């Protein structure tokens, strides 16, 4: 996720993505480690950024967006940690960050349950915690920032129904199903399909590819072996959709099916639509810019919403040259 930054698409909730939708307010409590000297260029606020993995281009872009946004403020310093797709490692890294006396924690958890406790511990120590993209259990954090994955999945399902005319055979390549985005994108997609109203529409193959393109390609190879006809593939992210395309192309079957992804990075999903590889992709903003905006408010002693919901856009061959279409 690098040739172009997603900042062009995610420069604040009030732009093309649509306005943020705040829910209940939460009090901003400055970190116990903060002192009168913190927050200056000589002694900047120390932010810990815990990323669950950098094996997904979208997560690389999230870190880049956080980094670029923070660099605009010389009174901020960000320390990045990569958990390499390991929840236990991420728990340990959060503890390392807390030992470094960070003033604020930004975390994008690998899984909800394993990361709930370390997030809660930071919150109890009066360290503001911004949970990004994937939720944790309970409410012991300061604010959650992310898009509505159920809504995005639902829109993908509606698009599939319309594209197939209400009948066809579908493959679903799921993201990590122990993560909230994977669960929500699956739930929303099935809601959008309304299978009970479309008896000629069937999901004939589904598999957890854990957000990774190589896994998606392998799972798609299995689907192609077992299914003589596939009309549409819905992948929970664009790398998964691209992996499916590569498998279908290798089997000489890429022309028979439509492919849908999620993420819509400028040089990835959006580019795939421009090239005709994908038929549609839905924007899932990284929230990196919004995380730094919220961090600045919290470190200044201001309140932020308990939940900040980011907007989405649909990109198809008909609108990709226009920057996609905002979904209300």
Image (tube, grey):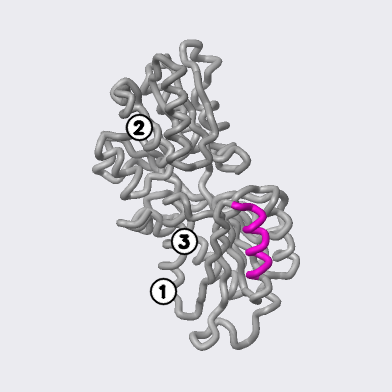
Say which residue appears at 50% left-offset and 22% top-offset: 205
Residue 209: x and y, percent?
51, 36
Residue 132: x and y, percent?
56, 55
Do callouts 2 and 1 mark residues in contact (Cβ within 8 Å)? no
Above or below, 220 relative to 64: above
Distance CA(mark 3)–CA(mark 2): 27 Å
Above or below, 220 relative to 319: above
Q: Which mark is residue 290?
A: none
Q: Residues in magenta? A: 86-97
Q: Quick check: 256 left or right of 19?
A: left
Say which residue appears at 67% left-offset and 55% top-offset: 88
Per the image, label 2 sits on a secondary structure element best described as: helix
Tell me the residue that label 3 is attached to: 63
Tell me the residue that label 1 is attached to: 72
- Give the mark nearest the N terminus, 3 or 1: 3
Q: Which mark is residue 245?
A: 2
- Give the mark nearest the N terminus, 3 or 2: 3
Q: Nearer the viewer, residue 113 or 185?
A: 113
Q: Quick check: 325 left or right of 211?
A: left
Q: Main secondary structure of the magenta part?
A: helix
Dot 1 surroundings within 10 Å: few (below 14), some, or many (20 or more)? few
């Amino acid at each position: 996720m690098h040739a172009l930054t997603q900042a062009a698409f995610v420069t604040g909730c009030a732009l093309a993505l649509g306005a943020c939708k705040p829910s209940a307010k939460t009090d901003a409590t400055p970190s116990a480690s903060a002192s009168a000297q913190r927050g200056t260029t000589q002694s900047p606020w120390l932010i810990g950024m815990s990323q669950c993995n950098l094996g997904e281009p979208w997560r690389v872009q999230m870190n880049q967006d956080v980094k670029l946004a923070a660099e605009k403020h010389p009174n901020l310093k960000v320390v990045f940690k990569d958990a390499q797709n390991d929840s236990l490692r991420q728990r340990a890294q959060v503890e390392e960050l807390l030992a470094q006396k960070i003033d604020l924690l930004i975390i994008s958890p690998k899984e909800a349950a394993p990361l709930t406790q370390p997030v809660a511990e930071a919150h109890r120590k009066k360290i503001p915690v911004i949970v990004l993209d994937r939720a944790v259990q309970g409410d012991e954090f300061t604010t959650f920032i992310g898009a509505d994955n159920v809504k995005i999945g639902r829109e993908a399902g509606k698009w599939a129904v319309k594209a197939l005319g209400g009948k066809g055979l579908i493959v679903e390549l799921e993201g990590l199903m122990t993560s909230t985005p994977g669960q929500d994108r699956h739930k929303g997609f099935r809601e959008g399909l309304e299978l009970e109203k479309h008896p000629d529409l069937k999901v004939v193959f589904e598999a957890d590819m854990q957000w990774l393109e190589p896994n998606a390609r392998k799972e798609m190879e299995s689907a192609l072996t077992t299914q003589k006809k596939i009309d549409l593939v819905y992948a929970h992210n664009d790398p998964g959709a691209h992996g499916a395309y590569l498998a279908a192309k290798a089997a000489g079957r890429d022309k028979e099916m439509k492919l849908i992804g999620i993420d819509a990075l400028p040089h990835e999903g959006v580019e795939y639509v421009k090239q005709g590889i994908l038929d549609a992709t839905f924007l899932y903003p990284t929230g990196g810019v919004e995380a730094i905006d919220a961090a600045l408010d919290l470190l200044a002693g201001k309140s932020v919403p308990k939940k900040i919901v980011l907007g989405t856009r649909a990109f198809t061959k008909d609108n990709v040259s226009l920057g996609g279409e905002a979904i209300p």
